[in-house]
Amino acid sequence: MSEAQSFEVAPSPVRRLLWLWVPLLLVAGLMVGTALDAPERSHTELFITLPFLAVLAAALTWAYTRRRIVLHQDTLDVKSTFYRKRVPVSDMRLDEARIVDFAEHGRYKPSIKTNGYGVPGFQSGHYRMADRSKAFCLVTDSSRVLHLPLRDGSALVISPDRPRALLDALKALAARPGAH
């Protein structure tokens, strides 16, 4: 397999960005309201802070849409928001991989964000699981999550649109002669 094989990420509704936009709009509204209410405050603050908030909102919105799962040669490459994880197939414990629904299997759900980006229903980056093990996550749909344990004790927790297809491709690649 010399050609890269892309796997679509499960869709995540754009409305989840309201968890980002609403607080930023509230901060902007409070700043404008206090600046207009207090004549001793300079309007220069607004000309600096409001564009900063707009750039911040744009950067976080762009990051939210940056998601990709690619199997290239013998490596799974997961890009998510500001993060990226490349894992050779030989480092995966595919015999223990599972497709899970967090509602039924809560132990596979990320619990503590250590270095990540998330809004309700969307998790990206580095997390600790319920058992305190480490995981790299790209979760957009908690009802169909591929949990891939790694040989170092950590895991990949990702939401491909078709998790069975990705797991089958990984197993086929691992079964090839000379794959290890």
Image (cartoon, rainbow, N blue to C red):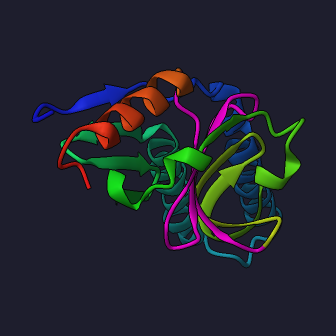
Residue 15 in picture, x, y percent from top left = 70, 27
Residue 144 vertical position relative to residue 133 in the rendered view, above or below: above
Q: How many marks?
A: 0
Can residue 158 be seen here? The reply is yes
Q: Is residue 149 magenta?
A: yes
Q: Residue furthest front?
A: 177
| Location of residue 137 in the rendering, given as x and y in whole percent from the top left corner | 58, 53
Q: Using the image as rendered, state which of residue 145 and residue 38 is in the foreground.
A: 145
Q: Quadrant of residue 3?
A: top left
Question: Does the stretch in magenta take in 17?
Answer: no
Kindly indicate the quadrant of the structure image that contains residue 155. bottom right
The magenta-colored residue range is 132-161
Residue situated furthest bottom in the rendering: 40
Decide if residue 104 is on the left or right side of residue 179.
right
Name the residue rendered at 51%, 57% in the picture.
Answer: 56
> Eyeballing the image, is 153 above or below 56?
below
The answer to which of 179 and 42 lies nearer the viewer is 179
Q: Quadrant of residue 21?
A: top right
Q: Position of residue 124 (x, y in %)?
A: 58, 53
Give how far across and how far down residue 65 sits, in percent. 47, 37
Q: From the viewer's perspective, is residue 35 above or below residue 11?
A: below
